[in-house]
Amino acid sequence: MVEGGRPAAPALTDADDQYAVVTHGLTKRFGRIVAVDRLDLRVRRGELYGFLGPNGAGKSTTLRMLCGILEPTEGEGRVLGIDLRRDPERVKSAIGYMSQRFSLYDDLTVEENLMFYARVYMVPRADRAARIQQMLRLGDLGGYPRQLAGQLSGGYRQRLALTCALVHGPRLVFLDEPTAGVDPVSRRTFWAVVRRLADEGTTILVTTHYMDEAELCDTLGFIYQGRLIAHGSPAEIKAETFARPVIELQPVDARAAADALAEWDAVEEVVRAGARVRLIAARSDLQVGAVRDYLAARGVRVEWANEVEPNVEDLFVSFVDRERKARVREQLRALGPAGR
Ligand SMILES: Nc1ncnc2c1ncn2[C@@H]1O[C@H](COP(=O)(O)OP(=O)(O)OP(=O)(O)O)[C@@H](O)[C@H]1O
Ligand SMILES: [Mg+2]
């Protein structure tokens, strides 16, 4: 069956329960907005899965459906083998969820927040105290059990929110931009905890806009306009889909260099970062020497230029661009020869 130009994937079977998360055609519409568009997602048990995409791509909406909080418009999904549509309440209690705006109670202390979530998640009464102690250690919050959550710094709030989502020992956790607005040292501490949890067997699906965090994931999924446009390990994605060079240079005048390069058809994308310019080539054979010659011919001097490893951001820019081009081509085809 072909629907909307794309062949439908086969429906979910029991074999799919090997995955911590599996969806088939998962869709969410808000009126006319298609926030999530026929998403087929597979997250293996025990992996750290990074979910990337620009603002408004549909990341939070996907997570809220996977947590059993938001009902899908269409499609199906299972989380730890539990059906999202049939059993959203069981989903909610089986997983941990740290929302994009951490849901902490500012007028409760650190310990009280943990106790609140321990009750919500129905941690047996006899286990609660020990579990809370364990969470204080995990989040490195031991020194502040009686501090009001509202008085904690950003990094502590974030670690408290994480431990609240983990207090019932879920095997699967969803973290929605957990490190937004947190300083670099706190981010690193936080990721060390996340990485350790994953290494100990917890499945983690985390959204982020930080490319250094994406590099720490086992698998990455890129979502754009509600669709999954690429997925794989950071290394796989680089090796299989990025055959064009990325060149970084330091010109004497970065603005003049960026402007000149942006007009060149050998260059797909130019990014200026302070005094440096980074470019993604439009073809696989572009060499550093040719870039220097091109700029020299336009009177732009270059102090140094090197080919560098593509980072996740380069990949993302390239995917989005490729997808955009593919859609334009699709639209042109729909118009037929007369439309061109
Ligand atoms: N409750 C809602 N009602 C109407 N539209 C919504 C609602 N929630 C999300 N949207 C829309 O759905 C789309 C996807 O939003 P979503 O929050 O999932 O994106 P996101 O990838 O999480 O973005 P960000 O990186 O900014 O957090 C956006 O166009 C958003 O405006
Ligand atoms: Mg979001």
Image (cartoon, rainbow, N blue to C red):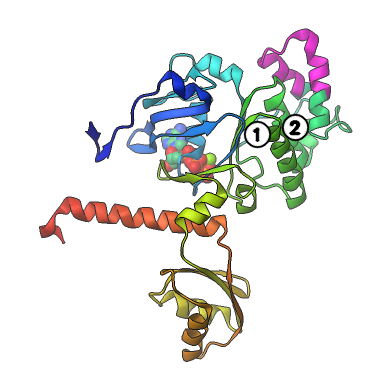
Q: Which mark is residue 160?
A: 2
Amino acid found under the numbered disc labelled 1:
Phe
What segment carries the magenta color? Answer: 114-133
User: Measuring 70% from the left and 37% from the top, which residue is drawn there?
Assistant: 194
Q: Quadrant of residue 320?
A: bottom left
Please state the total of marks drawn on the protein image. Answer: 2
Question: Which secondary structure class fits the magenta region best?
Answer: helix
Can you give x and y, in whole percent of width and height, for residue 272 in the image?
56, 70
Q: Which residue is mark 1?
A: 102
Q: CA distance from mark 1 to mark 2?
A: 9 Å
Q: Secondary structure at mark 1?
A: loop
Q: On screen, 226 above or below 238?
A: above
Q: Is mark 2 within 8 Å of ligand 2?
A: no
Q: Nearer the viewer, residue 77 or 257?
A: 77
Q: Residues within 10 Å of mark 2 (few under 14, many from 20)?
A: many
Amino acid found under the numbered disc labelled 2:
Leu
Q: Is mark 1 within 8 Å of ligand 2?
A: no
Q: Which mark is residue 309?
A: none
Q: Is residue 14 left or right of residue 329?
A: right
User: Measuring 39% from the left and 29% from the top, which residue is drawn there?
Assistant: 24
Q: On screen, 83 above or below 230?
A: above
Q: Answer yes or no: do the residues labelled 1 and 2 have beta carbons within 8 Å?
A: yes
Is residue 121 within the magenta segment?
yes
Q: Secondary structure at mark 2?
A: helix
